[in-house]
Amino acid sequence: MAHGARELLGNCLMSLREHPPSIPMRVTVVDSGSPDGTPDMVEEDFPEVRLMRRSNIGFSAANNRVLLESGQEDAPGLFLLLNPDTEVRQGTIDAAITRIESDPRIGMVGVRLVTADGSFDHAAKRSFPTPLSALAHFTGIGRRAGASPALSQYRATDLGEDQPGEVDAVNGAFMLVRAEAIRQVGPLDEGYWLYMEDLDWCRRFGLAGWKVFYEPAGMALHLKGGSSPARRQPRQEIAFHRGMGRFYRRFDAGGNPGAVNLAVYLGIGIKLLISLAISAASGNSRKTAG
């Protein structure tokens, strides 16, 4: 799915052209209302790519336009969700394919993600957050070196970044998914407009008995936030925090006391207000500087 990331998408598609997998591949770009001529670039520079033009319907809905094809008789056996701010390297996709084909119960594979400076993107492998680990992650305490397992749990620190293994979740920037699993679990939940839909999908895969696997033998560049402004816009902030609340309500609220649930929802609301305030202050600073 692409929205307003023309240059990044071009680099992504070029990486797929230069580093294709060893099996046949069809590339589809679902353009979600890009205002910068992105779909025209795809048609002109990448004629081999199938293009779908849509309005800005959100990440889940845009990807589902392709994922729903998994039920067709001529559907491929594997689907790869790839963000426009990623670039694959030689052997990346094949490494993921080899892993998913090694075990018929593996339904989804993610690879090692690195940022522009070559550092590891810890979102490549994750555990489902507890209220404590989520609080520690967003305050930064859980991301510090030497943080206790209870505080750093969201980053799946029990599995090394160079160690392949089963995890709770991988990042939606690169998800190789088995079509059979999609038919059982269903596509992405369109109740998430943007953010958290990948974590939700991984949770549903696990509940249905499918393994989610992290495979560091494959590597992809992930320019985190490259297709979005430096800070999330108000609509994006609201979507992010609504997604947090939706995920917690769907999977965790029923097993926790009411007081815990109230604290979690209040925490999400307070974090949203703080994030909106910081975004507003940042916007005012840019206007003043301009």
Image (cartoon, rainbow, N blue to C red):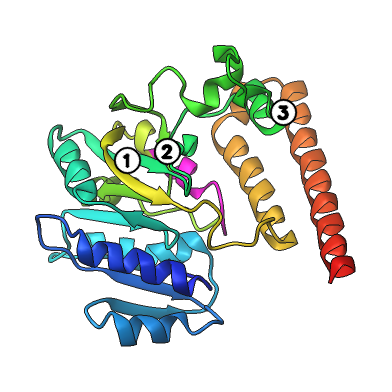
Q: Quadrant of the C terminus?
A: bottom right
What residue is pinned by disc 2? 124
Question: In this figure, what is the number of numbered marks?
Answer: 3
Percent x, y of residue 24: 11, 62
- Look at discs 1 and 3 and give the one toward the viewer: 1
Query: What's under tag 2, amino acid-wise?
Result: Ala
What residue is pinned by disc 1? 111
Decide: few, some or many residues near mark 3? Use Cα within 10 Å; few <14, some 14-19, many ≥20.
Answer: some
Decide: few, some or many residues near mark 1? Use Cα within 10 Å; few <14, some 14-19, many ≥20.
Answer: many
- Residue at horizontal 15%, vertical 55%? 21
Kind of element beneath mark 3? helix
Q: CA distance from mark 1 to mark 2?
A: 7 Å
Image: 49 above or below 81: below
Q: Do the CB atoms of the residues marked 1 and 2 lie less than 8 Å apart?
A: yes
Q: Quadrant of the N terminus?
A: bottom left
Q: CA distance from mark 1 to mark 3?
A: 34 Å
- Residue at horizontal 53%, vertical 59%? 226
Q: Could you say which quadrant of the image residue 285 lies in?
A: bottom right
Kind of element beneath mark 1? strand
Q: Could you say which quadrant of the image residue 216 lies in?
A: top left
Q: Do the CB atoms of the residues marked 3 and 2 lie less than 8 Å apart?
A: no
Image: 13 above or below 261: below
Query: What's under tag 1, amino acid-wise?
Result: Val
Residue 261, labelled with which disc? 3
Nearest the eye: 133 or 215: 215
- Residue at horizontal 45%, vertical 59%? 85
Q: Earlier in the sequence, mark 3 or mark 2?
A: 2
The residue stretch that appears in magenta: 192-204
